[in-house]
Image (tube, grey):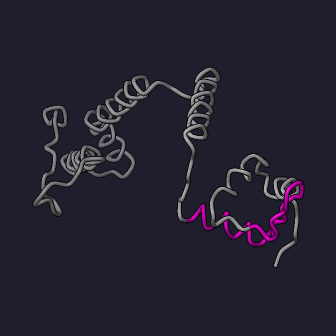
Amino acid sequence: MGKRVNKRELAEIFGISERSFTAYQKDASFPIARAGGRGQANEYDTQDVHEWLMERAVSGARHESARERLERIKGDREELALAKDLEELVPAVLVGARLESVALSIRTELLTGNPKLKTEIDTLYDIDLDIELLNEHSRSVLRQLAALGREPGPGDGPGHGEVPATGEDQLN
């Protein structure tokens, strides 16, 4: 058993408005420890209310009135507008263009950087590395990147549906 309090105290304890608790009381399952008569305040057991709020959150039983839903939507829109004004949000079209640019840069470097890497490895370790090892590694990385975010289709398994490397002529 928790502490018995009135609605104002309940609102302070849980950080929820008195108006919300008034709306919650319309739900027959909301716990009222002692119903006040006319002109008398109801009493609430904090433990019972806490359990009710937790059950409500866990079960996802959000019973919004049309007015509450409208207020929530308006609030969400205002938050999004503020975030956009503060440049905390970026339009998806700009993000997509930037990601394409980054992906192209990565692909280009993977496809054209192997001769330079071969030269550096050959010089550092005094060997003659077969560039095809580097090229195959680059193609493998590109196939893995191309498959990211793609939904597996029927019959897909290990090695199935690999994306052929493009620009292989750039690798040699």
How many numbered marks appear?
0
Residue furthest out toward the front: 38
Seen from the viewer's position, the closer of residues 9 and 132 is 9
Q: Is residue 160 left or right of residue 33?
A: left
Snapshot quadrant of residue 66:
top right
Snapshot quadrant of residue 36:
bottom right
Q: Position of residue 110 (x, y in %)?
A: 30, 38
Seen from the viewer's position, the closer of residues 12 and 139 is 12
Seen from the viewer's position, the closer of residues 102 and 68 is 68
Measuring 31% from the left and 40% from the top, which residue is drawn there? Answer: 119
Measuring 20% from the left and 49% from the top, which residue is drawn there? Answer: 136
Q: Is residue 39 magenta?
A: yes
In which quadrant is the C terminus drawn? top left
Residue furthest out toward the top: 85
In which quadrant is the N terminus drawn? bottom right
Q: Is residue 165 above or below residue 6?
A: above
Is residue 107 visible to the viewer in this orientation of the structure?
Answer: yes
Seen from the viewer's position, the closer of residues 94 and 171 is 94
Q: Position of residue 138 (x, y in %)?
A: 26, 45
Q: Is residue 142 left or right of residue 81?
A: left
Q: Is residue 60 above or below residue 77?
A: below
Residue furthest out toward the left: 155
Q: Is residue 74 magenta?
A: no
Q: Which residues are magenta?
A: 32-58
Q: Position of residue 91 (x, y in %)?
A: 46, 24
Snapshot quadrant of residue 31:
bottom right
Q: Is residue 85 above or below residue 39?
A: above
Q: Position of residue 103 (x, y in %)?
A: 34, 34
Measuring 13% from the left and 52% from the top, which residue is drawn there? Answer: 161
Measuring 27% from the left and 33% from the top, which residue is drawn there? Answer: 112
Is residue 128 visible to the viewer in this orientation of the structure?
Answer: no
Q: Is residue 31 above or below residue 115?
A: below
